[in-house]
Image: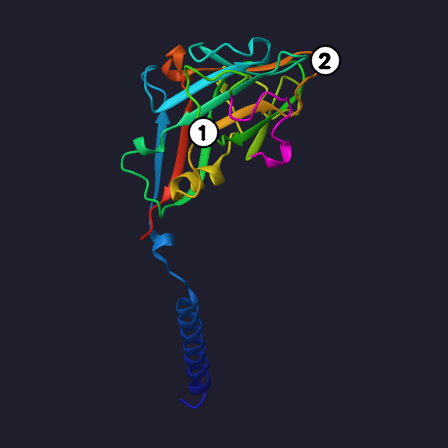
Amino acid sequence: MNVRWPRVAVALGGLIVGMTASSASAASLALTSQSLAPYQTCTITATPATTTAVTDATVRQGSATLNFGTLTSNNVSSGSAINQRTYLQFDLTTCSPAIPASAVIRLGTLRLYLTALPAVCRTIDLFASTASWTETAITWNNQPFGAAINNPASGSRSGSFTAGTPVGCQNRTTGTYLVGGTVTTDVASFVAGSVTNFGWMLRDDVEGSATTRTVTFSSKELATVAQLPQLVVTYVSVP
């Protein structure tokens, strides 16, 4: 018995220490409603083609007073006096269930289907639009960001991605949705109501190149389900 007591004491001591450490760990663990709440997803899709939940249009410097809101494709181009930009807007109020203003936005992603790419890698900038526009009236001259090229400055962009066929470019393949259209911060501001949702403008990071470079996406007017513009929002609802 005298030989066994130290061993039992050691075992009990280890158990007590283990229980104490576990208790301390549990006590220090911050279990918030946010960490326990399940992720939810809202996907806003341009279907049918006549939906007002999604609006998209291209503006063309070379046809500065004309509207191109009914084309089956949208373009972003850099060229000599023929730059093109794409405007997109998604109505977040169409999400069902509605995304609460208090929700934590985990990820906001633009999904645009690539149909044509330039032979060089181009950076495409994403900017939250600062004013309202309509699909059937927007032109190069009346667009929210004005007619000057390379405006706004790249430093104010919400995000960017690269597109082109060379090795190393982020998006190198047509016939697929682009990678890198992340707009989480903008979506969070739209949902919270701190910024009005006027959608986004996409432009080449360096407009006015000597050789024309164009990235082309399917528009909602194409009405092809597998190529529809989408905004995917992943969020957590918290009290």
* Residue at 62% over, 18% down: 164
59 is higher (above) or lower (below) than 150: above
Depth order, front residue of 101/95: 101
Magenta includes 16? no
Disc 2 and disc 1 in contact, CB within 8 angstroms: no
- The amino acid beneath tag 2 is Ala
| Residue at left offset 45%, top offset 87% | 3
Element type at marker 1? loop
Q: Which residue is mark 1?
A: 199
Task: Kindly tell me whether residue 43 is visible in this rendering.
Answer: yes
Q: Is residue 154 magenta?
A: yes
Measured in 3D between alpha carbons, the distance from the residue under mark 2 to the one under mark 1, in whole angstroms, is: 30 Å
Q: Determine which quarter of the picture holds residue 50.
A: top left
What type of secondary structure mainly makes up the magenta span? loop
Q: Is there any visible trace of residue 174 in the rendered image? A: no
Q: Is residue 37 left or right of residue 18?
A: left
Instruction: Report x, y in % for residue 26.
Output: 40, 67
Residue that mark 2 sits on: 210
For the rendered model, the colour scheme is: rainbow
Residue 96 percent coordinates (x, y): 27, 34
Residue type of the residue flagged with mark 1: Gly
Q: On the picture, is 217 further left or further right than 157?
A: left
Q: Which residues are magenta?
A: 143-157
Per the image, label 2 sits on a secondary structure element best described as loop
Q: Is residue 154 above or below residue 122?
A: below
Which residue is at the far right? Answer: 210
Determine the residue positioned at 55% across, 19% down: 85
Q: Residues within 10 Å of mark 1 (few under 14, many from 20)?
A: many
Q: Nearer the viewer, residue 224 or 202?
A: 202
Q: Nearer the viewer, residue 35 or 85?
A: 85
